[in-house]
Image: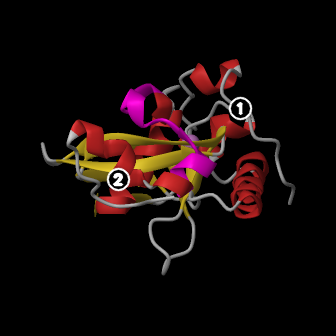
Amino acid sequence: MAILKIARAGHPVLRKPASPVPLSDIGSPEIQRLIDDMLHTVDDADGAGLAAPQVHQSKRIVVLQLDDDRGMEVWINPELTPLTDAHLITFEGCLSVPGLRGAVARPAQIEVSAYDRTGAPLQLVLDDFAAVVAQHECDHLDGVLYIDKAIPETLSFLDEYRRYGAQSLLAPRGDELDAEGE
Ligand code: NI
């Protein structure tokens, strides 16, 4: 396994819609090695998730941790559907945008359809923090970064975010923080 180099904002690979992985390729040594390397890389970087375009592979694969009790999930060709009009405001960060945090409003509950690393289909309903992480990672597959969706005046360097607190960044807008993710 290898630790892969993570592309940073400004690299064109982060802006290109990623290609679906043909189902017949999921079991291939190349895809399995990429998944192993992504798991190793996200663990090394201490991230909540990683999408293949972030390691310069324009393929629809994400690895992500939905909560502390579960290990990393691997989703191939994920499709997300919002299940509610209710939105959740949380602060997000991204391994491709190091040193920044910003508040994003996202649908609070979604349905996910994807394939796992064995090629088996999976379907699940996620809410709260897990729904946010899933949407953040899957946005990468469409060339979208969280900074595109962040409430502009909440963008903050990590030091200031920690010093002044998430709520102080939202307070001038009258918004309430729903959860503090990092
Ligand atoms: Ni990200």
- Name the residue that disc number 2 marks: 167
- Name the residue that disc number 1 marks: 8
- In contact (CB < 8 Å): disc 1 and disc 2: no
Disc 1: CA contacts within 10 A as few (<14), some (14-19) or many (>=20): some
Farthest-out residue, bottom: 69
Residue lying at 57% horizontally and 61% vertically, measured from the top left = 118
Q: Residue 17, percent across and down?
A: 53, 23
Amino acid under disc 2: Gln
Q: Is residue 113 visible?
A: no
Q: Quadrant of the N terminus?
A: bottom right
The yes-or-no answer for disc 2 within 8 Å of ligand 1 is no
Q: Residue 19, percent across and down?
A: 56, 28
In the displayed structure, does residue 59 sit left or right of residue 85?
Answer: right
Q: Is residue 59 magenta?
A: no
On the image, which quarter does residue 78 sit in?
top left
In the displayed structure, does residue 6 sit left or right of residue 130?
Answer: right
Region rendered in magenta: 148-162
Q: Is residue 161 magenta?
A: yes
Q: Residue 74, percent across and down?
A: 55, 58
Distance from disc 1 to disc 2, alpha carbons, whole Å, reads 27 Å
Amino acid under disc 1: Arg
In the displayed structure, does residue 124 sit left or right of residue 22?
Answer: left
Label 1 element class: loop
In the displayed structure, does residue 68 sit left or right of residue 178?
Answer: right
1 vs 2, front mark? 2
Disc 2: CA contacts within 10 A as few (<14), some (14-19) or many (>=20): some
